[in-house]
Image (cartoon, helix red, strand yellow):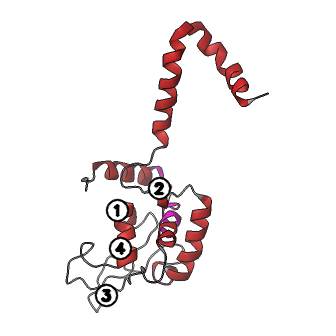
Amino acid sequence: MPIIMLIMECIAPVIMPLGRKWLLIVPLACALGGCGDRSAPGDDPRADPRDGQRVALGARVYAQQCATCHGAKLEGQPGWRRHLPNGRMPAPPHDESGHTWHHPDSLLFGITKRGLIPPYAPADYQSDMPAFGGKLSDDEIWAVLAFIKSHWTSKEVVETRAEMMRSAPKR
C-alpha cells in the first residue's frame, strides 16, 4: 500500500468530520509543524550536529588537529579563564562548560579558519590559537564545528543558545 494511503487511513477519522475545512487546516498544520525543526539564526547548516557523517568527519579532524589543546573530551586546558604567565589565555573547553556555544557558527568558523585576529579579536591580542585555513578545508572546519555542537545537548544550553542567536544583531 502506498505511504500516502497509510497516512490518509490514519488521519481520515480526524479530518473527515471537518468537511472541506481540512483543505485549509492540514497545509497550515504541516507548515507550522516544520517550524520547530528550523535552526536558530546564527546556526549554519554546514555545521549541523544532526548530520552523522559530518560529525564523524569532524570527530576525526578534531582528534588530529584540536584535541592537543582543547582536550580529547572538549574539556579545554586547566585554568582556561586565567591568563598564563606569558599573558595568553589557555585553550577554552568546547563542551558545555565553556563559552564556545555562546557564539554564532560564522564567528567560530572565522576564528578557526583565520585565527584570533581582527575582526575576531583586538589587533594587539596575542593567542596560541593558530589559523587552520591553510591546513584544513572549509568542509573540514564545518565538520569540526558540527562535532563540537553535537556535544551541546542539555536543554539549558540548547534553549539559551537558540535565544542568544535569535537576539544577536543581524550583520
The circle drawn on residue 111 is 4
User: Label 4 vs label 1: CA separation?
Assistant: 11 Å
Residue 67 at x, y percent in the picture: 51, 80
Which stretch is magenta?
A: 144-155
Q: Residue at x 55, y 70 (%)?
A: 58
Q: Secondary structure at mark 1?
A: loop
Q: Quadrant of residue 82?
A: bottom left
Which residue is disc 3 drawn over? 84
How far across and how far down the image is residue 4, in percent?
A: 69, 27
- Residue type pointed to by label 3: Leu
Closer to the chain start, of discs 1 and 2, is: 2
Which residue is nearer to you in this view: 139 or 18?
Answer: 139
Above or below: residue 95 compared with residue 165:
below
Q: Residues within 10 Å of mark 2 (few under 14, many from 20)?
A: some
Q: Nearer the viewer, mark 4 or mark 3?
A: 4
Q: Position of residue 15 (x, y in %)?
A: 59, 14
Task: Let me know if residue 133 is in the magenta part.
Answer: no
Q: Is residue 146 magenta?
A: yes
- Dot 3 or dot 1: first in sequence order is 3
**Amino acid type at image mark 2:** Pro
Q: Amino acid at mark 1?
A: His
Say which of marks 1 and 2 sits in front. Answer: 2
Measure the C-alpha gap from mark 3 to mark 1. 23 Å
Give the label, 2 or 3, closer to the camera: 2
Q: Amino acid at mark 4?
A: Ile
Residue under pointer 2: 45
Judged by depth in the image, the label closer to the viewer, 4 or 2, is 2
Q: Dot 1 corresponds to which residue?
A: 103
Please provide percent x and percent y for residue 50: 56, 55
Ranked by sequence position, the earlier of labels 2 and 3 is 2
- Marks 4 and 2, how far apart at CA: 18 Å
The crowding category of the residue bearing disc 1, from other C-alpha atoms within 10 Å (few below 14, some 14 to 19, many at least 20), is some
